[in-house]
Each structure stands twice: as C-alpha cells, then as structure tokens.
C-alpha cells in the first residue's frame, strides 16, 4: 500500500461520510472567511471527467437576491407538492430548505460551452453533472469536518435561477447550497426521521457480474 492514512485519519474520513446530513436548520453565526475559502477550495479539487472542471460557484451576499431565490424555491415547492398527488399534504409539512437562516448561500452550476469537452463525454454527456456532484460532495464532507452543516436545495426551476444570476444561456444551475453553523446534526437523515423514506439495504444495490435485482 502506498502512503495509507493513519488509523485515526481513516476514522475521521469515514466519520465525515456517515455523519454528513442534509441540514435544514441553522443558527445565524457567520462562517469564518478562511473556513469558507477552504470549503470552496475543496470543491475546486474534486475529480472531473476529462479534467474539464465544469463547476461554477456563485456566492450570494445580496439580501434581495437571496429573497428572490427563496421565492423561486417556494414556487417550485408548491408545484412539486401538487405533482405528488396523495402525498401532497405530507410533503408540504416537510422543511425542505434553510435558505433564510443559513449564514452562507452558494449556487453550484454547470459552466456554459460544455459541448467543447469530448473526453469522457462523447457517449455519456451527463458526466459533466457527475463532476459537479463530486464538487458538492467535497464541500459537504469538508463542512461536516469543520463542524458546519450544509443542505442541498434542488427544488427550483433552472431557468428562474439562471435569470436571477445572469448566467449565460448554456450554463445550468444545479444546486443551491445552504451552509452554516447548526445547533446539532440530525441523528439520522431527516427524511428518515420524518418517515418520508428509508435507506435501502445495501445488498439490494450491489450486484456481481450481472444485474440481479428482483
């Protein structure tokens, strides 16, 4: 083995993975600038297909813009609820974001001009999205290690957010990230404790040689 982490370092990595939560409750304590910079740098060191580095990160510091983004999310929250049929009322009771309470709000987006990048995308163009997802996960795990909570908001119309942020036509917003201090981390994913869904058993997601799901 080449340069493995120490036992305590490995334990810290796995702890961050297992204790990461999609947070929706925040306290208003500011995030220290040097910590925020570390988190953004962690995102920028994510793996990307063909080394295209397709992520673009917009930090939202304007209060009116934050309010407008929240309104966009609220519109889609109602539309999502209507699309859920019998689970509409159940969904509307869920807290799905902490955009007004979190200390920092970041929008993660795909850059424009991605069609120029062919390496790794010729048959699977969606790998640009996979690369941005890796950047988001890097922030999430680093935030947990720093004692900060993060929530991923995806309930919005991309065109609404693109317009609000003045993005070029080929760019696409992927996630609104709520970042900040929390009173405590959830003991389990909130959608489990709210009985919206449960984690699938591992054996139902892992196959050997052939797809064997029943």
Image (cartoon, rainbow, N blue to C red):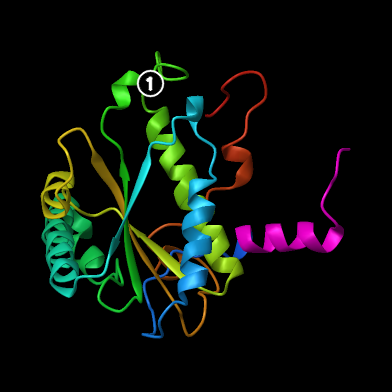
Q: Read off the magenta span.
A: 1-17
| Left or right: 4 in relation to 208 | right
Location of residue 23 (image quadrant): bottom left
| Left or right: 209 in relation to 24 | right
Q: Mark 1 points at which residue?
A: 117
Q: Is the magenta stretch mostly helix, strand or loop?
A: helix
Q: Where is 105 relative to 6, above or below? A: below
Q: How many numbered dots are placed on residues in this image? A: 1
Instruction: Please provide percent x and percent y for residue 47.
Output: 54, 38
Instruction: Please provide percent x and percent y for residue 148.
Output: 50, 73
| Left or right: 127 in relation to 164 | right
Q: Which residue is drawn at 36% across and 85% down?
A: 28
Q: In which quarter of the image is the N terminus?
A: top right
Instruction: Label 1, secondary structure: give it.
Output: loop
- Among all residues in the image, which is located at the extreme top? 122
Q: Residue at x 24, y 63 (%)?
A: 91
Q: Which of 53 and 154 is in front in this view?
A: 53
């Amino acid at each position: 083995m080449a340069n493995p982490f120490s036992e305590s370092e490995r334990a810290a990595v796995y702890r961050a993975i297992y204790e990461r939560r999609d947070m929706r409750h925040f306290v208003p304590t500011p995030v220290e600038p040097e910590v925020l910079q570390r988190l953004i740098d962690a995102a920028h060191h994510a793996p990307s297909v063909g080394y295209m580095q397709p992520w673009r990160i917009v930090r939202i510091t304007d209060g009116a813009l934050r309010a407008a983004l929240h309104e966009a999310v609220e519109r889609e929250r109602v539309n999502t609820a209507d699309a859920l049929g019998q689970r509409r009322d159940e969904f509307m009771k869920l807290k799905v974001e902490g955009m007004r309470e979190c200390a920092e709000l970041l929008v993660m987006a795909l850059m424009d001009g991605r069609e120029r990048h062919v390496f790794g995308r010729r048959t699977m163009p969606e790998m640009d999205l996979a690369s941005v997802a890796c950047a988001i996960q890097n922030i999430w795990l680093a935030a947990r290690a720093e004692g900060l909570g993060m929530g991923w908001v995806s309930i919005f119309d991309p065109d609404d957010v693109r317009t609000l942020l003045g993005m070029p036509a080929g760019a696409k917003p992927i996630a609104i990230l709520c970042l900040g201090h929390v009173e405590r981390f959830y003991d389990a994913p909130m959608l489990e404790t709210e009985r919206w869904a449960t984690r699938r058993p591992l054996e139902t997601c892992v196959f050997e040689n052939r797809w064997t799901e029943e």
